[in-house]
Image (cartoon, rainbow, N blue to C red):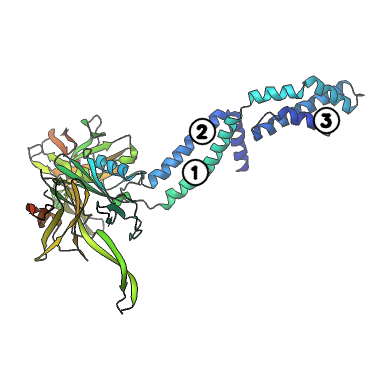
């Protein structure tokens, strides 16, 4: 069907109340298709009817274009359409820029722009439901406890390892590891106290591979190190000498900062042979 | 790929516009968050960064008594990272980096802010009940010339030709807090490398002064925490009000 000027004028008037362009075009198309279907139907029923008359009849049956214009304007609010278009463009711009930034920015090891990561051997034996406390907007929880049994032939010393997770929903201010290292004191089952004060004592042990090559490895003998992190938490492996340990011996972590102090305890029952 | 995209578009067409708007906004927010985290979660103001440093280092909230966040009037700072502070006599003092000092009870908190959060620094030091020195030190904790002020005027080149000369006076800065009323002059002397190095200061507020020892290079290999000092405060008639000795970093 050729669109003539009467039909075009009718359609333009009917949709002119729709202020959002894409909606206006869509509704115009739907109306045009509907009118065309009506005309085809009429000509099928009355094959002798001229095309102009069929069009006139259909347009007359559709009603006054000004009235339709007002009705369509009421139904099609522009603001939602504009918002949606704007959000489409925003997403199209933000997504590649964010991906570019994410790939281009150098990730600092356990730094503030690292989303997640791991370091070192991690927590050897995890526990659930460990002692929990809150301080300064952070939640401190014990997440692991084990007696690490190193082979004497390798030259290593046995240690006790406790996992400490510090979490917060405020991912933009994860706890600084130095705050933990400076304020943590560990208390061994035999009562021995080790104030970390930012220090780490490393031990060494020798490992021989299948070809007889000996590799010297370092391990944490006394202190804490960041071993696991995510957007919502940082987890530390806290180690202390395992003198006089017996299964069930209690290890206590005391955190004394200027913002306050907490104390968390865990019985160490699990033995892990390394 | 085209078929897949067309199928996705057809599916999206069936979802209402409101839902599609919500979907776009949520994903835009997520991607913005991703970019923000990857940039190190920068905050808009120095005070917010300082407060965050306090919280992440488990320090209680302090009252900010010093910040070199002023916009330079002389335009003579060495780097865009430097900040200015203005003495009551109008002297513009520049410090390398953005410093914030807070006080809470008998402790001061000194923070050095940086665009790269991994280079930021905060430490806490004790304060005396009377006038107390707070050294503005960076990570190295040695006396370094992190402050400077500039004089300029007609002069001459080394060859003797007339020229307009800018002279940068570098100094190791110390904040003096809890200063009593009626002080018109202050002097600090430190003992390093077998000798004594002295410097005066500028009043920034009623009870806050910035003292400086002019340096051209880092002094000594001893950390500041082991450096002896003498502080002298003078009245308007130049008589000595107070003389105090101690070790830097101990209040």
User: In terms of sequence position, does the residue under pointer 1 or pointer 3 come before the other?
Assistant: 3
**What is the spatial separation of the Cα atoms under label 1 and label 3, in whole angstroms?**
45 Å
Q: Is residue A64 left or right of residue B181?
A: right
Tell me the element at label 2: helix
Across and down, in percent, residue A271 comes to: 18, 38
**What is the spatial separation of the Cα atoms under label 1 and label 2, in whole angstroms?**
14 Å
Give the farthest residue toward the front.
B237
- Name the residue rendered at 24%, 29% in the picture: A129
Closer to the observer: label 1 or label 2?
Answer: 1
Dot 1, crowdedness within 10 Å: few (<14), some or many (≥20)? some
According to the picture, the residue beneath numbered tag 2 turns out to be: B23
Give the farthest residue toward the right.
A48
Tell me the element at label 3: helix
Asked if labels 1 and 2 share a chain, the reply is: no
Asked if labels 2 and 3 share a chain, the reply is: no
Across and down, in percent, residue A232 comes to: 33, 37
Asked if labels 1 and 3 share a chain, the reply is: yes
Q: Is residue B53 above or below residue B90?
A: above
Q: Is residue B233 visible?
A: yes
- Name the residue rendered at 8%, 54% in the picture: B239
Closer to the observer: label 2 or label 3?
Answer: 3
Q: Is residue A9 left or right of residue B64?
A: right
Q: Is residue A221 above or below residue A187?
A: below
Q: Is residue A225 visible?
A: no
According to the picture, the residue beneath numbered tag 3 turns out to be: A6
Q: Determine which of the numbered discs, if any, sits on residue A94 in the image.
A: 1
Dot 2, crowdedness within 10 Å: few (<14), some or many (≥20)? some
Closer to the observer: label 1 or label 3?
Answer: 3
């Amino acid at each position: 069907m050729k669109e003539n000027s009467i039909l075009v004028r009718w359609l333009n008037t009917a949709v002119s109340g729709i202020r959002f362009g894409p909606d206006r075009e869509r509704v115009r198309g739907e109306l045009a298709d509907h009118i065309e279907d009506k005309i085809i139907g009429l000509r099928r029923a009355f094959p002798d009817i001229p095309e102009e008359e069929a069009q006139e009849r259909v347009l007359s049956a559709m009603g006054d274009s000004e009235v339709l214009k007002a009705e369509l304007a009421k139904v099609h609010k522009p603001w939602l359409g504009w918002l949606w278009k704007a959000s489409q463009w925003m997403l199209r711009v933000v997504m590649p820029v964010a991906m570019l930034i994410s790939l281009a920015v150098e990730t600092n090891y356990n730094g503030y722009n690292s989303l997640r990561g791991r370091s070192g051997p991690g927590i050897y034996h995890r526990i659930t439901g460990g002692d929990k406390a809150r301080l300064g907007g952070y939640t401190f929880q014990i997440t692991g406890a084990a007696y690490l049994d190193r082979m004497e032939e390798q030259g290593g010393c046995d240690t006790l390892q406790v996992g400490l997770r510090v979490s917060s929903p405020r991912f933009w201010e994860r706890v600084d590891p130095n705050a933990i290292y400076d304020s943590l004191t560990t208390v061994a089952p035999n009562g021995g106290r080790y104030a970390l004060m930012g220090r780490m004592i490393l031990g060494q042990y020798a490992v021989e591979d299948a070809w007889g090559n000996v590799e010297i490895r370092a391990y944490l003998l006394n202190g804490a190190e960041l071993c696991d992190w995510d957007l919502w938490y940082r987890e530390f492996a806290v180690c202390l000498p395992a003198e006089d340990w017996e299964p069930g011996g209690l290890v206590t972590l005391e955190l004394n900062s200027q913002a306050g102090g907490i104390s968390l305890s865990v019985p160490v029952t699990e033995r892990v042979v390394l | 790929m085209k078929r897949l995209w067309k199928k996705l578009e057809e599916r999206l067409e069936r979802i209402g516009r409101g839902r599609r708007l919500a979907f776009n906004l949520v994903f835009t927010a997520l991607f913005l968050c991703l970019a923000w985290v990857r940039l190190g979660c920068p905050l808009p103001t120095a005070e917010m960064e300082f407060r965050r440093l306090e919280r992440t280092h488990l320090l209680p909230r302090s009252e900010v008594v010093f910040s070199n966040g002023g916009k330079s009037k002389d335009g003579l700072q060495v780097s865009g990272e430097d900040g200015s502070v203005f003495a009551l006599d109008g002297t513009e003092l520049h410090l390398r980096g953005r410093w914030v000092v807070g006080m809470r009870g008998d402790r001061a908190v000194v923070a050095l802010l940086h665009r790269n959060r991994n280079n930021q620094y905060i430490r806490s030091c004790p304060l005396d009940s009377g006038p107390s020195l707070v050294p503005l030190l960076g990570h190295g904790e040695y006396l370094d010339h992190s402050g400077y002020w500039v004089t300029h005027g007609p002069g001459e080149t080394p060859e003797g030709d007339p020229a307009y000369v800018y002279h940068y006076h570098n100094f190791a800065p110390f904040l003096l807090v809890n200063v009593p009323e009626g002080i018109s002059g202050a002097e600090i002397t430190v003992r390093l490398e077998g000798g004594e190095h002295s410097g005066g200061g500028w009043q920034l507020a009623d009870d806050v002064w910035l003292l400086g020892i002019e340096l051209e290079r880092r002094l000594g290999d001893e950390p500041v925490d082991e450096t002896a000092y003498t502080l002298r405060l003078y009245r308007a008639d130049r008589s000595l009000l107070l003389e105090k000795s101690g070790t830097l970093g101990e209040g």
